[in-house]
Amino acid sequence: MSTIRRVGAFLEVLDEDGCRHLLRFSTIQAVSDTDPLQNETLITAAGRTIRVNVALDDIVAMLATQEAVSQFQLVSPVQGHTEGRFRP
């Protein structure tokens, strides 16, 4: 299995310990970069935080439809750097 995949209304993730988690989209509270390379992400869902080896942008693409993504833009105070916050 890849580290992350969409399964209907759920997101299936494989954490750094090799454990699988099936998260309902509506329970996901936060998605955050874990490092400056932006190749790992923390997903907080239902009060639990899971680290996955997937870039934040790849996870956002799976979570949102193209219409929803187009309503937001990443806030970047420095060109080439992403803080991971969204602005309507």
Image (spheres, rainbow, N blue to C red):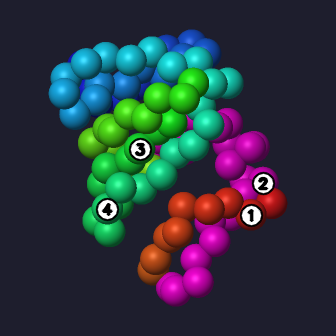
Name the outermost residue toward the bottom.
78
Q: Is residue 61 above or below residue 72?
A: above
Residues under numbered marks 3 and 2 in contact, where contact means CB atoms less than 8 Å apart? no
Disc 3 and disc 4: Cα gap in Å?
Answer: 10 Å
Q: Is residue 38 above or below residue 69?
A: below
Secondary structure category for the residue under label 4: loop
Q: Is residue 9 left or right of residue 87?
A: left
Numbered badge on residue 35: 4
Q: Residues within 10 Å of mark 1 (few under 14, many from 20)?
A: few
To which residue does mark 1 refer?
87
Quadrant in the picture for residue 27: top right
User: At 51% across and 36% down in the image, what residue appears?
Assistant: 44
To which residue does mark 2 refer?
71
Secondary structure category for the residue under label 3: strand
Which segment is the magenta one?
A: 58-79
Q: Earlier in the sequence, mark 2 or mark 4?
A: 4
Residues under numbered marks 3 and 1 in contact, where contact means CB atoms less than 8 Å apart? no
Residues under numbered marks 2 and 4 in contact, where contact means CB atoms less than 8 Å apart? no
Asked whether residue 25 appears in the rendered view, the answer is no
User: At 73% across and 57% down in the image, what residue appears?
Assistant: 72
Quadrant in the picture for residue 50: top left
> Split into 4 quadrants, where in the image is the C terminus?
bottom right
x, y percent for residue 29: 62, 37
Q: Earlier in the sequence, mark 3 or mark 2?
A: 3
> Viewer-nearest of labels 3 and 2?
3
Disc 1 and disc 2: Cα gap in Å?
Answer: 9 Å
Three-letter residue code for mark 3: Leu
Numbered badge on residue 42: 3
Numbered badge on residue 60: none
> In this orientation, which residue lies closer to the viewer: 2 or 84?
84
Disc 3 and disc 1: Cα gap in Å?
Answer: 20 Å
Q: Earlier in the sequence, mark 1 or mark 4?
A: 4
